[in-house]
Amino acid sequence: MLRALRIKDLAIIDELNLEFIEGFAVFTGETGAGKSIIVDALDLITGGRGSSDIVRDGCEETVVEGIFDKIDKIGLHNKLSRYGIETDSDELIIRRSINRNGRNRLYINGTLSTISVLNDISSRLIDIHGQHEHQTLLRKESHCEYLDAFGKLSDMKNMVAGKYQIINELQIRLNKIEENVRGKKEKEELLQFQLSEIKGASIRAGEDRELVEERNILSNSQNLSALSHEAYSILYENDESVISSLGKVEDLLTEIAGIDEKMGEAADMTRTSSVSLKEVSDIIRRFKDNIRYDPERLESVTGRIYLLDRLKKKYGMTIEDILTCQERVEKDLESIGYSDQEVQAIREEMEKVLNDAGSLATELSDCRRGAALRFEKEIWDELSHLSMDNTKFVINIEGVPLSQNGIDSVEFMIANMNEEPRQLARVASGGELSRIVLAIKSRLSSMDSGSTLIFDEVDAGIGGGVAEEVGMRLKYLSHDNQVFCVTHLPQIAAMADSHFYVEKVVSGDRVVTKVKKLDKEERVEEISRMLGGRDMTKTAMKYAAEMIERTALNSHKS
């Protein structure tokens, strides 16, 4: 429940410090006194929109702080822990500031937080009904929850949700296995391609060096032929060839050695050189005779070298690296193993769980439709007591794909006389909407146990006995919840456990809104004013006192 509220520099409020108790509280005052600003402040600490135009003139920032206790009753501790917010006690403090530049700062138990976190947390703290947007019952996603609570179908829905969770878990497992299989198959395809590419090349060690040498010769064959022919001619074929001339030198030296033995060694050396040169000429001859200009072979060798270079870029720097890579690929292929049996087993299990979930969801849907008819009837009855005899409450249920909520989309709708049902959020007036919400909440009060419910404009367009009916239902709701109501009706105000009076006063040269908690005598005066205006007669005062006493007695009896 909300135990305290602090407001500083919001609109025409300079500073307010309010404390609250359990039960039913009302805010009354003249029109325009600023009662709606209190509701606006509560809206801010529940995640409502805040802008710089709410900052009081002449001030730098607006600050709103709410202190809540008994948060364990509404199960907030676990949710706060998930957001990293410490909760050493059963107390929660929400502080929000908005400066002149429109910058928001939000702290939850002293921890800097975000609006999205606040929206999530505050959904169980405060529920505002009236002209404000922060209304749980206006959110379609909550309607199924309310219907299930009315029909006591939560256990059955939890069973469906459990099956749905199993389906999701199986789907996650299946996705992982299928992804793993796909990965293995892709790897296998890659390895097979690599092996095929390497084997298809039929490479051998040292081949690249041989090919480079051959390409060098083939590409220079014409030049090599010309050079070798010339060398052979100089050495052997010409009339003045080196070998022929050397033979003549040998004859001359032999003749000289016959005269002078000292030249015998020179003659021998010349003879040896002649033999060596004849061997060289034979090598040259064989070389030139084997030279062929072969463009086709050159093209083939060049292509082969290109292929080997490409394989080197992919699989290794050398032929030996490529062959090593081939061995590794072959081993990797042997190690790859996968089976479709596990995939098939999971799919069969999923089908079984889906069938079970479908049967449960169908049963749940049938129960919901039956509960919807009963719920509609009870809400129609409630609305008739709230001066809305011509308003029909309709629950629209449509089939949807299986989810954790089953196979139903549930939406609360309203139909006026001779009109088609409309979405609850499209009800024209805030007063009508508040009474519809009040009717629904009255039938589901235990579901919101521990929350703080705010009703603004709930008394719009009603009076007399209807006002008393509204007050009784607000009082009834306050047995399980803390209830705030902004009202102009004395019949409602008389039923409150605590009464706050809102008024505008002049402070210095400015008008400010003040809020005062009324004592017993002040309550009598305020309700007397609400009955008869500013002229508070003894009769009005007496009637106001009797109203308070009567409602207190009736409340005690109930």
Image (spheres, rainbow, N blue to C red):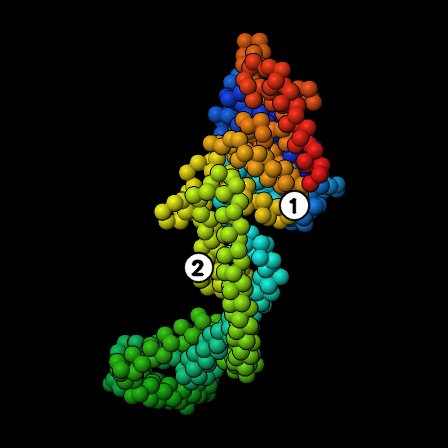
Q: Seen from this angle, which residue lies furthest right? A: 89
Kindly tell me whether residue 256 is visible in this rendering.
Answer: no
Identify which amino acid the numbered label 2 is placed on: Glu
Kind of element beneath mark 2: strand
Where is the N terminus found, in terms of image quarters? top right
Q: Which residue is mark 2?
A: 398
Q: Which part of the image, by quadrant, shows the C terminus? A: top right
Name the amino acid, label 1: Ser
Please state the horizontal and vertical placement of residue 314, each as a whole percent of the image.
45, 71
Please, is residue 489 above or below residue 113 in the view? above
Whole-percent x, y for residue 310 in the image: 40, 73
Q: Is residue 200 visible?
A: yes
381 relative to 165, above or below: above
Return the residue at label 1.
Answer: 449
Q: In percent of the image, x 29 and y 79: which residue is there?
A: 299
Q: Residue at x 48, y 35 (%)?
A: 431
